[in-house]
């Protein structure tokens, strides 16, 4: 079989491979190289060693964005997953209208970040109007605004994943727990939660990376206002690239650091939650 | 016992009904604000339009003119449909091939695809836009190739996971019966992969339709604006923001999504759940 299909490798692999080289491999390698250069376009790059990286760490706005992003990510991962799991748990109890509620909760997920940002900008500014403030009055408002927005968008998606996880638990396991006299909260803590750990792994992974990489929502809701205090990492990198000429190299160095952070966090999380998964 | 359960169920139904109404309230608020005169939107966003504040479709006509929304809609549709179709076709073939041929090259390629999934877009955005510039891919047809390249990771990963579960015997039987690998793939393997293809297609559609940054950087945006770009431009391009037009454009941006969602709801929810399990 191997030999027959080998002849066909150009037809099967080449289109994807070529696009992948253009869309990923070349930009990725070039990106790593350029983070060590001074440049405005790719062709005028001059090698400057690690000076870009030194500039990154003396850039206060980047350090602030890093802390803001980290804090936001922790808050978003916890709230989204707790709310999504609670809703999923209740919706699998079987009462009238669960399908409709599921449909409603999932819907915001399909709306894009830019549109979401402007929807919530109107709502938050409308509420804050009663206190004669606006969303860009302080970074705290921006932080909680983004948090509410992200919950609204992501809870439905994670809920679907948790519902799938809960429905995957075989009825016999639940039955056995009930016969053994386990109370409702015992079933929840000792049976359901351990059994949905695979769903937890994937949901935490998705919320973690989505929050850490957040860009569109950040741009549309506050655009980093007031004075860059609500700027997250992705937006900070974008502004470094396209906001000030001469800083493209620094922007690329920030991007490489960003990539390393995302990769390390994602892999650590996968490693730690995978360890807690159990077999029935 | 049963009566107790019934009461509890009713209570949950009522509670969730209230939460659901609150949940969709933001969209309702945007909807009725889009029919209010500009001056009244920011001043009192929660009050319903009345005789004094009602503006008819004025916001819609001005918004459509300012953003040339119809052409944006066309570009978004073309780019999304084209990219998703190409991604499904090319990556399913690629995933099948690299899963079945167990060469070092295939393994290495698979590793690269998985690796690309954790690389954030900011890492490659500058160099990708320059590469696209250099290769003249800055139009709606060219960007489809860029999407195939940047979106291939997730798609290949999901297809490969599923191909592994397809029994080899079926394919071998087809090859022995004289099917070429191409025939085997299109007539035997692809129909089996259909559920995965739906999942991948939905995930990629949600991503590409809503994507802002990639088309903003890759496309020649003087000529081609997708819907998210057009909306962002409404804020950036005209000094003070025309909030009336903005409301109308938000509604027009949401309508296709709701139509898509309602008509494919079953597949979307299944696709998301299946995609998560594979991931």
Image: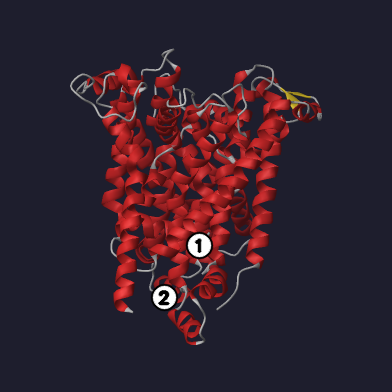
Look at 51% across and 84% down and name the residue there. Answer: A181
Depth order, front residue of A90/A104: A90
Percent across and percent down for residue B146 are 49, 37
The reply to whether residue B128 is in sight is no
Q: Is residue B60 above or below residue A74?
A: above
Tell me if residue B142 comes above or below residue A14 in the rendering.
Answer: above
Q: Residue at x 29, y 71 (%)?
A: B6
**What subunit carries mark 1?**
B
Picture quadrant of residue B33: top left
- For label 2, count other residues whose C-alpha is less than 10 Å away and answer few (under 14), some (14-19) or many (20+): few
Residue picked out by circle 2: B173
The dot on residue B278 is 1
* In the image: residue B276, left or right of residue B1: right
The answer to whether residue A77 is left or right of residue B254 is right
Q: Nearer the viewer, mark 2 or mark 1?
A: 1
Query: At which x and y percent is residue A152?
Result: 44, 45
Where residue B256 sits in the image (x, y, percent)?
Answer: 29, 39
């Amino acid at each position: 079989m191997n030999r027959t299909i080998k002849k066909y490798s150009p037809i099967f692999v080449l289109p994807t491979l070529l696009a992948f080289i253009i869309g990923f491999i070349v930009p990725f390698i070039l990106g790593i190289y350029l983070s060590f250069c001074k440049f405005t376009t790719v062709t005028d790059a001059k090698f400057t060693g690690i000076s870009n990286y030194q500039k990154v760490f003396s850039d206060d706005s980047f350090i602030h964005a890093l802390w803001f992003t980290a804090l936001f990510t922790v808050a978003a991962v916890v709230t989204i997953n707790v709310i999504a799991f609670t809703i999923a748990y209740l919706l699998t109890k079987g009462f009238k209208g669960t399908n409709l509620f599921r449909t409603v909760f999932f819907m915001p997920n399909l709306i894009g970040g830019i549109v979401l940002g402007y929807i919530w900008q109107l709502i938050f500014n409308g509420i804050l109007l009663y206190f004669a403030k606006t969303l860009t009055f302080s970074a705290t408002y921006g932080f909680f605004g983004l948090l509410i927005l992200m919950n609204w968008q992501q809870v439905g998606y994670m809920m679907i994943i948790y519902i799938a996880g809960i429905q995957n638990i075989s009825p016999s396991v639940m039955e056995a727990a009930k016969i053994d006299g386990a109370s409702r909260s015992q079933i929840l803590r000792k049976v359901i939660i351990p059994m949905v750990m695979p769903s937890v792994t994937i949901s935490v992974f998705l919320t973690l990376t989505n929050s850490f990489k957040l860009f569109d929502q950040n741009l549309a809701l506050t655009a980093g206002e007031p004075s860059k205090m609500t700027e997250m990492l992705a937006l900070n990198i974008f502004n470094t690239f396209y906001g000030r000429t001469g800083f493209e190299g620094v922007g690329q160095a920030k991007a490489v650091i960003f990539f390393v952070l995302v990769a390390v966090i994602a892999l650590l999380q996968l490693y730690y939650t995978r360890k807690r998964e159990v077999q029935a | 016992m049963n009566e107790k359960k019934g009461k509890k169920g009713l209570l949950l139904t009522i509670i969730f009904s209230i939460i659901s109404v609150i949940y969709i309230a933001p969209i309702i608020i945007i909807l009725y604000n889009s029919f209010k005169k500009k001056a009244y939107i920011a001043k009192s966003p929660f009050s319903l339009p009345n005789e004094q504040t009602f503006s008819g479709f004025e916001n819609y006509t001005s918004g459509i003119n300012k953003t040339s929304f119809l052409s944006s809609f066309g570009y978004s549709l073309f780019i999304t449909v084209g990219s998703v179709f190409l991604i499904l076709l090319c990556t399913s073939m690629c995933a099948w091939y690299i899963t079945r041929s167990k060469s070092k090259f295939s393994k290495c390629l698979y590793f690269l695809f998985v690796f690309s999934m954790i690389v954030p877009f900011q890492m490659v955005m500058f160099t990708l836009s320059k590469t696209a510039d250099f290769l003249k891919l800055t139009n709606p047809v060219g960007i489809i190739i860029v999407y195939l390249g940047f979106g291939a990771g997730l798609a290949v990963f999901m297809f490969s996971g599923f191909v592994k579960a397809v029994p080899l015997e079926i394919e071998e039987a087809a090859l022995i019966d004289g099917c070429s690998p191409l025939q085997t793939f299109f007539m035997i393997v692809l129909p089996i992969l259909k559920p995965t293809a739906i999942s991948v297609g939905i995930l990629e559609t949600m991503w590409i339709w809503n994507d802002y940054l990639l088309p903003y950087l890759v496309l020649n945006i003087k000529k081609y604006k997708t819907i998210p770009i057009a909306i962002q431009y409404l804020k950036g391009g005209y000094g003070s923001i025309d909030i009336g037009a903005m409301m109308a454009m938000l509604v027009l941006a949401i309508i296709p999504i709701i139509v898509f969602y309602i008509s494919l709801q079953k597949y979307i929810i299944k696709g998301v759940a299946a995609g998560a399990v594979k991931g």
